[in-house]
Amino acid sequence: MVEKAMQQGNGTVTTGTTHPVDEMLPAGMLFAFGLQHALVMYAGTVAVPLIFAAAMHMSAAQTVLLINCGLMTSGIATIVQSIGFWKFGSRLPIVQGSSFAMLASMLLIGQIYGVPSVFGGVIGAGLAMVLLAPVMARLMRYFPPVVIGCLITIIGLTLVPVAGRWIGGGTPGVPGFGSVANLLLAFVTILITVAVQAWGRGFLANISVLVGLIAGSILAALCGMGHYGMVADAPWFAVSMPFAFGLPEFHLMPVVIMLLSMVIIVAETTGNCLAIGRVVDRPVTDATIAGALRADGLSTVLGGLFNSFPYNAFTQNTGLIAITDIRSRFVVAAAGVVMIVLGLFPKLGALIAALPPPVLGGCGLVMFGMTTIGGVRELLHVPFEGTRNGLIAAVSIGLGVLPMACPDLFTHLSGLWRLLLGNGVLLCILSGVLLNLLVGAGETDAADGKGERSGS
């Protein structure tokens, strides 16, 4: 906590404290810590436009355009979410990235209606999110600590396969995936990250993930595993312009499909706000969730205007905050600035994109594991004796892991149902909330009063 003098109206000076979330760090530290967050979220941010462009058979120039637009709007969205203005933004250290959950719906719309209809659906869903945010936020009262603990645990576990794919080399099934070289590079990166965190002191320990990324990349280059040809081919400067694929087209079904899919974003953003709130020790109220959802909606509208996609609160930085214990939302805002710069200078973005996937996977495994431990730590404070919380946790975590453990389980369902039920975070939330209402309503909250939340 930072001691801070406050001037009162009567001229006296009293000493107050600044919460770590609101602490403004020196410029150098802001950049270093912000760069860590940007590096961690970068791969996830560019993955959606890359997959969308490939599935829609776009040209290389169109693919680069989608990536640049995604980076720029992701940076703006992160600043809105973390700094906030009026009723927009959670004012928590949360990064914003393109939602993987929306990818299947966007591809379906694009293949039937065309790319302009995708962006029209994105804009329509974003506007609806802004308007409905207060209603959605009031659902927070149905999230007792046992549901929160299960949710944070599942968020971490759901991300582990992402780290696994990075460790193997990026895409399962391609030649070289899971090679000994990739596994060794990831293992060494993990060792470096853990060693710096465990035995480093002060500032060095706090940038352990950044050190791991840099050291792993240098080692990969020395072993001939780096591929930096794309850096030379990328232009130095490019400004993303709106409506690059034509004016958005608005059709009823694409907007409805996108809006229904936004349920997943609501669930993920709510869960991520709760997770970050626990990590940084700041209460998350209905007003906080409403602000976060409004920011999601506004960012999604911005994405549709600037050739990008729906945005939600990313989980990638939760583990990073837990590792470094740097809770300042201004650090995350600095990461947003870095993302904007990467979007304006494609060569810089290409340099970051050239980071070997096993290096990202090694660092990601540490951070996603820390997110999971955050959920376990939350569950340690839940009373299980004399309550049905054990039953709620067992079923919720089991259902949350199910789509990850058996990806083909819902293949015979229709597209939208498969999309919804294939999301472990959403299954965990629905199971926890419904079971708490049916078999355990109020037990945990009555014991510790944590179920009380202020309204928006």
Image (cartoon, grey):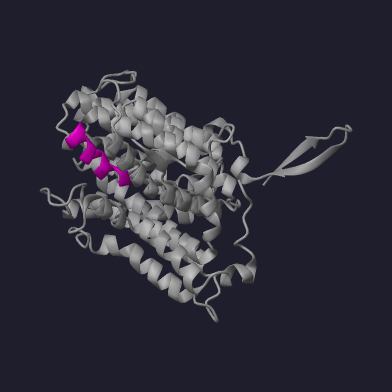
- Residue 43 vs 76, above or below: the answer is below
Image quadrant of residue 51? top left
Query: With 54 as the anchor, is 95 left or right in this view?
Result: right
Image quadrant of residue 341? top left
Asked if the magenta segment contains residue 105, the reply would be yes
Q: Where is residue 275 in the image (x, y as percent from the top left)?
A: 49, 54
- Residue 122 vs 278, above or below: the answer is above
The range drawn in magenta is 101-113
Name the residue: 40% across, 65% down.
431
Q: Position of residue 213 (x, y in %)?
A: 35, 43
Q: Position of residue 122 (x, y in %)?
A: 34, 34
Residue 296 visible from this viewpoint:
no
Report the front residue among 248 and 182. Answer: 248
For the view shown, which residue lies furthest in the left direction? 175
Report the front residue among 248 and 177. Answer: 248
Query: With 435 as the anchor, is 405 left or right in this view?
Result: left
Asked if the magenta segment contains residue 159, the reply would be no
Query: With 5 as the anchor, is 187 left or right in this view?
Result: left
Name the residue: 38% across, 28% down.
72
Residue 10 visible from this viewpoint:
yes
Name the residue: 42% across, 59% down.
429
Q: Quadrant of the C terminus?
A: top right
Query: With 329 as the anchor, is 447 left or right in this view?
Result: right
Q: Where is residue 265 in the image (x, y as percent from the top left)?
A: 39, 46
Name the residue: 35% across, 69% down.
398
For the view shown, which residue lies furthest in the front direction? 252
Q: Is the magenta stretch mostly helix, strand or loop?
A: helix
